[in-house]
Amino acid sequence: MSTDSNPVRQWRAPKTVAELAAGPAWTLERSPTTGQWSTAEWHHGPWQIGLTPVRHGVIAAMLWSQDKLVEHTRGGEATICAKVTGWLEEIARNA
């Protein structure tokens, strides 16, 4: 039996910043010369998440609450997207 006929599909966590920032709550800034994203930001109430590329293949992610840095991490794109997805899920659970 094909899973394509199943109306309920399992949610897949984003693996790229483009996928992660596709939601309406995200703001994605791009370089006017290269088109590469330079920052991605998400805001909700007291919470803010910021992403920025550090060097090739490495992204920095910061989580703030009421202008205080709560967590900061760096890693590959898929790893950072998974981490940020975890932050978003935790914020939603505690809302």
Image (cartoon, helix red, strand yellow):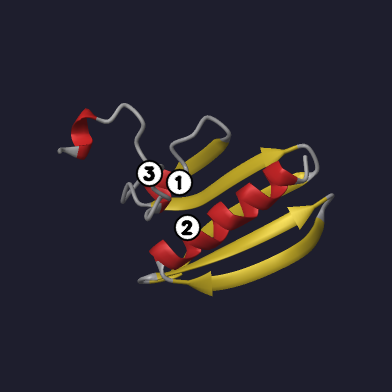
Residue holding disc 2? 81
Q: Amino acid at mark 1?
A: Leu
Q: Residue furthest left?
A: 1
Q: Amino acid at mark 3?
A: Pro
Q: Is residue 80 above or below residue 49?
A: below
> How far, Cα to Cα, is label 1 from label 3?
21 Å
Secondary element at image label 3: loop
Residue holding disc 1? 20
Q: Amino acid at mark 2?
A: Cys
> How far, Cα to Cα, is label 3 from label 2?
24 Å
Question: Is 11 displayed left or right of 24 in the figure?
Answer: left
Few, some or many C-alpha atoms within 10 Å of disc 2 (few <14, some 14-19, many ≥20)?
A: many
How many numbered discs? 3
Q: Are marks 1 and 2 in contact (CB under 8 Å)?
A: yes
> How far, Cα to Cα, is label 1 from label 2?
7 Å
Few, some or many C-alpha atoms within 10 Å of disc 3 (few <14, some 14-19, many ≥20)?
A: few
Few, some or many C-alpha atoms within 10 Å of disc 1 (few <14, some 14-19, many ≥20)?
A: some
Q: Nearer the viewer, residue 50 or 19?
A: 19
Residue holding disc 3? 32
Q: Quadrant of the C terminus?
A: top right
Question: Is 1 displayed left or right of 19 in the figure?
Answer: left
Secondary element at image label 2: helix
